[in-house]
Image (cartoon, rainbow, N blue to C red):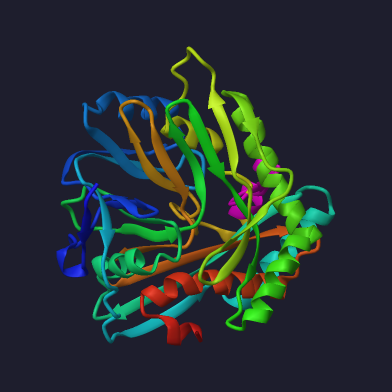
Amino acid sequence: MGVEVITAAELPERPLLFASGADAYMPDRVVRTMPSSDGSDPTWADEVLAALAPGQRALGALSFAAGAPGIFHLVQGGERSLVGPAVPPRPREYDVHEFPTAERYAEMVAAALEEISSGVLHKVVLGRCLDVVSRPPLVVAEVIDRLLATRPGRYVFSVPLQACEEPGPVLFGASPELLVRREGAQISCTPLAGSAPRSDDPDEDRRRAEGLLASAKDLAEHAFVVDAIVHALKSVCVEVEAPATPELLATDTVWHLASPVRARLAAGLEGPSALHLAQLLHPTPAVGGVPTDAASATIAALEGDLRDYFAGCVGWVDGSGDGEFAVTIRSAVIDGDRLRLFAGAGIVAGSDPALEVIETGAKLATMGRVTGLSAELGS
């Protein structure tokens, strides 16, 4: 695989891309777009797989909620390594609106804690957004260029949410979290749950990391996610293995607890594709909660119609069923001069509303930096 220098000037205006580590899939040609009103429907996944010709992939995204939209673009060619200098943000004026406000978000966390103390919930993830109008409008290609250069998350992605040749919203971001990867019979997941904001002071940063590893609250939150993934994988896999304790994973703004989970499809069976596995696993408690139905009801009641594709998953699958999907966190949607950034935090017994406001603010800062919003976010 060759190394190709890509800058914003060379990217399409609305790029379609999924990058994992140093490697990226930026297709040469879009053959067909296949949207669905229900991205959780396995028959639609069957149709996507059946439509793939040799040498093609389907690249796209699923929404957070069951029964909500999904979209995949059937594409050809374009696997490469992308490197290049980051293009600095152009001067812009921004109108920024918190939704909900930090004060309202703290109230939402307190309401969720009441549900947890009553026994209705064990964990729920609550999100908040920044709605931004920029003048002149942000250009997706510029932001992707900086994400590819700075890599605040392992998975850099950009997915138009309608036919690529049509103007409209684009989902993009830099996720640190692997939902699922299938390579032949080998299955991998790396859930993240439990986090702490990083510090510019090395000693304080180390203390925060060590504190996260020792935090009973964060370890309990993490265990919910790992247990749910292991349980789901056991329904379709053999030799499901998860570490006894999590490890640390660092991004530019946040420390995470991470647990690499490995499994294998049974010999002699074709097994589910990466897309079918994504439908099976998503949403994990890392973005939803436990129990799933009660958490989903709480999210809908407290957040309202906030998420759509946020906290969903994004990735690719090929005709053999192999593929890779990341959880759609550290993400944004841009549509003309309007931008929405999203971040969430896991709420469990012992969560502090004020600290969850700080945590979500740190997560919003990842995309805030690459979109030029650092001053407005106070960083």
Q: Which residues are magenta?
A: 286-300
Q: Residue at x 21, y 46 (%)?
A: 78
Viewer-closest of 71 and 152 = 152
Helix, strand or loop: magenta stretch:
helix
The residue lying at 66 percent from left, 39 percent from top is: 242
Left or right? Give the position of 23 relative to 39: left
Residue 124 falls within the magenta-colored stretch: no
Front in this rendered view, residue 305 or 233:
233
User: Where does residue 327 sit, x and y in percent of width and height?
Assistant: 49, 50
Residue sticking out furthest to the right: 118
Residue 126 lies, in percent from the top left, at: 62, 60
**Residue drawn at (73%, 63%), measured in percent from left and top?**
111
Relative height, residue 22 to residue 182 (above, below): below
Report x, y in % for residue 302.
62, 60
Question: For the view shown, which residue lies furthest in the front direction?
Answer: 2
**Rendering quarter of residue 21:** bottom left
Residue drawn at (64%, 76%), measured in percent from left and top? 205
Is 211 left or right of 148, judged from the image as shown? right
User: Across the whole image, how many numbered discs are drawn on residues?
Assistant: 0
In this view, 79 is above or below 146: above
**In the image, is 64 to the left or to the right of 2?**
right
Residue 24 appears in the rendering:
yes
Residue 100 in sight in this render: no
Q: Position of residue 116 (x, y in %)?
A: 79, 54
- Seen in the picture, residue 220 relative to 376 is either above or below; the reply is above
Residue 295 counted in the magenta span: yes
